[in-house]
Image (cartoon, helix red, strand yellow):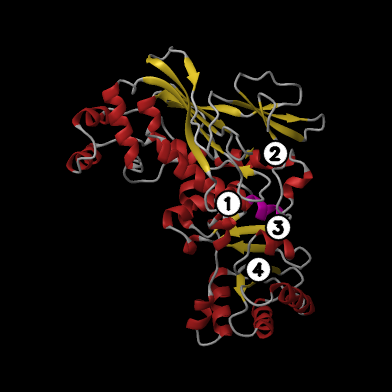
Amino acid sequence: MSLPPDRRPAPGRGTALLTDHYELTMLQGALHSGAAERRTIFEVFARHLPHGRRYGVVAGTGRLLDALERFRFDAADLDFLRASDIVDNVTLRYLESYRFTGNIWGYGEGDCYFPGSPILVVEGTFAEAVILETISLSILNHDCAIASAGSRMVTAADGRSLIEMGSRRTHERAAVASARAAYLVGFSSTSNLEANRRYGVPSAGTSAHAFSLVHDSERHAFRAQLEALGKGTTLLVDTFDVDRAVRDAVELAGPDLGAVRIDSGDLPVLAHHVRALLDELGATHTKIVLTGDLDEYSIAALAAAPVDGYGVGTSLVTGSGAPAAALVYKLVARADQPGRDSPLRPMAKRSVGKPGRGGRKWALRHRDETGMALAEEIRLTPPDPGPGDRLLLTPLVRDGEIVGREPLAAARDRHRQALAELPPQAFQLSRGDPAIPSILENGTE
């Protein structure tokens, strides 16, 4: 399976050991009991959305397919498992030739999801499917959380540009994934260069306060930046005195200065003041960019300010208070005997507080005649969609071959389309119920 240029996996070792220990001990036990070759269905879903959220966003599917393609136990992995006495020789022989040969369906990346939505359905033998739990959840829980928070920020920005700049506030690998997820939901660019190289996310950046401090004066710093980057650059104007900095910036660059950035202080007041000062100095087209611990709430509060863009860091890469999407990976059906054609029967745990619902699920989104979403129907039988309904599960892997890979731009477009069909209450930042109900086949919510 070859990758297009914008979808090549990151260099380095495989992904097989990005796995919880207990998955291999379950595999070992199942190989000895004979259950390893039983056909199974696992599903990824969220029992609930983060408190008060109206919708979630599916993200990370492309990264998961890349990880699945590299999910192999090489000689070094097997030597480690052997030396650490983690599994026995029978299990090591199985892992040596491990390849996922089953089928995977999923919601399209960028689509919205709701409680109970089966955003990933994995069909394979128990041995093949169970060891994909950690890699699936670690990618989807992270990326869905970032995308869900980022989507709210894009809505709050109401057409103003957003740059993702959280690399210094999270793990170095998470920073790359966060930039991808943010771009997927509508951010215009990222500060992270690896995200640019690996996923084609546009990158941007000019200077920090250190650049002003290392020069003999702020004017010297501005002059150096303008000479290096041109008049279209963005000058940081809050290192010392904002008024003086804006005046110096326009004097040095002229009215064609690209933008000024404000990173501290009373941002709404400063934005109005700086806009008036720029206009007074003739820099009527110079833009104002705000940064500094912004989230969707502070962005919404700046709606009336004369601002052209925002930079968001910490809040974005931590999911704005919900750093994981609360997704789970559960076995919902299994065969009683080995064999690809063995019939499946529903399976679900009965534990208090975390009950399951057995059976493989299908999903469709009911929409009215205008295309507005009305409900998410989750069925135990293949659905018969009506004229306005939209089927939600698409093939991602067929008989072990990846068939659902797509450009990041396609997921970005899908997210815009998915948001367009949600009712207005979906975009309220106040706490509330999911934007549309999740209806189970038996009629319950």
Seen in the picture, residue 163 relative to 11 is either above or below; the reply is below
Marks 1 & 4, CB-CB < 8 Å contact: no
The 10 Å Cα crowd at callout 2, few under 14, some 14 to 19, many 20 or more, is some
- Position of residue 158 measured from the top left corner of the image (x, y, whole percent): 74, 55
**Mark 1–mark 3 distance (CA, rounded to whole Å):** 13 Å
Task: Report the disc number at residue 157.
Answer: 3
Report the span colored magenta.
151-157
**Mark 4–mark 2 distance (CA, rounded to whole Å):** 28 Å
Of the numbered discs 4 and 2, the one sitting upstream in the chain is 4
User: Chief secondary structure of the magenta span?
Assistant: helix
Task: Report the disc number at residue 290.
Answer: 4
Magenta stretch: includes residue 154: yes
Of the numbered discs 2 and 1, the one sitting upstream in the chain is 1
Can you identify the residue that label 2 sits on?
A: 417
- Decide which of 16, 3 is in the foreground and name it: 16
Magenta stretch: includes residue 165: no
Quarter the N terminus occupies: top left
- Mark 2 residue type: Gln
Of the numbered discs 3 and 4, the one sitting upstream in the chain is 3
Of the numbered discs 2 and 3, the one sitting upstream in the chain is 3
- Mark 1 residue type: Ala
Q: Secondary structure at mark 1?
A: helix
Can you identify the residue that label 1 sits on?
A: 182
Task: Report the disc number at residue 391.
Answer: none
- Decide which of 224, 97 is in the foreground and name it: 97
- Position of residue 178 measured from the top left corner of the image (x, y, whole percent): 52, 52
